[in-house]
């Protein structure tokens, strides 16, 4: 039991040494800089990465320029095989299309014991002259734009309405003439009614 108790710390130290060796064997570091850090719009600047690899086996490293709106990278991905304990410098040119301050990003991909790993490196860069960098969405309210003036509505007088005679076509017989209108009868005078006079009968004798 005493021997087993003494061997446990030794095994733990041995395990820690193995784990530390594996971590150190797959370590890759990268440093990036942009020269010059300030350039005019359209001028070329160089992005340089210094890669350092410490491991027991060689590994392939790929450097890919990141996408930065307003800045063009004049190169694609570049791959290099790094041997244990070696260093490698990789560069690519960039050009700004608009003035402004940018962060230039590079992606470094490599294999670590068969697994893919990736590093991201950033460096500041400023472009001067030329058109300015547009406002990024979500960065707050930008400069107010003048509202275009709307033309006043034009007043148009309505066309006069022609009330002349209506032409009904071939069925138009003209105005209808109904002749003279008879005069209305005058009202009868008011008062007691007068009985009619005795008229002679058929025999011709007047009634007594």
Image: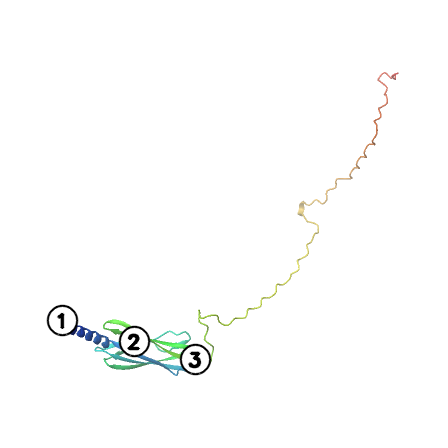
Where is residue 195? Give x, y as percent. Answer: 84, 24
Dot 1: element:
helix
* Crowd tier of the residue under label 3, counting other residues whose Cα lies within 10 Å: few below 14, some 14–19, many 20 or above: many
Where is residue 174? Give x, y as percent. Answer: 71, 45
Which mark is first along the chain, 3 or 2? 2
Where is residue 176? Give x, y as percent. Answer: 72, 42
> Closer to us: mark 1 or mark 3?
1
Residue at the image position 26 percent from the left and 73 percent from the top? 111
**Can the viewer see residue 41?**
no
Q: Quadrant of the N terminus?
A: bottom left
Q: CA distance from mark 1 to mark 3?
A: 67 Å
Residue at the image position 22 percent from the left and 75 percent from the top? 20
Q: Which of 75 and 108 lies nearest the eye of the viewer? A: 108
**Which quarter of the picture shows residue 66?**
bottom left
Q: Which of 145 and 44 lies nearest the eye of the viewer? A: 145
- Count of number-bearing discs: 3
Residue furthest bottom as drawn: 36
The residue identified by callout 3 is 127
Q: Is residue 168 shown left or right of residue 7? A: right
Q: Quadrant of the C terminus?
A: top right
> Closer to us: mark 1 or mark 2?
1
The residue identified by callout 2 is 62
Dot 3: element:
strand
Q: CA distance from mark 2 to mark 3?
A: 27 Å
The residue identified by callout 1 is 5
């Amino acid at each position: 039991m005493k021997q087993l108790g003494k061997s446990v710390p030794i095994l733990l130290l041995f395990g820690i040494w193995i784990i530390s060796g594996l971590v150190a064997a797959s370590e890759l570091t990268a440093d990036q800089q942009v020269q010059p850090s300030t350039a005019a719009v359209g001028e070329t600047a160089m992005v340089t990465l210094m890669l350092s690899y410490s491991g027991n086996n060689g590994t392939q490293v790929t450097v890919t320029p990141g996408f930065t709106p307003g800045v063009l990278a004049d190169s694609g991905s570049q791959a290099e095989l790094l041997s244990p304990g070696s260093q490698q410098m990789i560069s690519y040119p960039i050009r700004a299309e608009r003035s402004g301050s940018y962060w230039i990003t590079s992606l470094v991909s490599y294999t670590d014991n068969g697994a893919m790993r990736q590093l991201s490196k950033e460096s500041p860069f400023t472009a001067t002259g030329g058109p300015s960098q547009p406002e990024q969405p979500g960065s707050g309210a930008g400069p107010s734009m003048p509202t275009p003036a709307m033309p006043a509505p034009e007043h148009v007088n309505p066309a006069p309405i022609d009330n002349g005679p209506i032409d009904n076509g071939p069925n138009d017989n003209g105005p209808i003439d109904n002749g003279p209108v008879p005069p209305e009868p005058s009202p009868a005078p008011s008062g007691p009614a007068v009985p009619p006079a005795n008229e002679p009968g058929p025999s011709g004798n007047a009634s007594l």
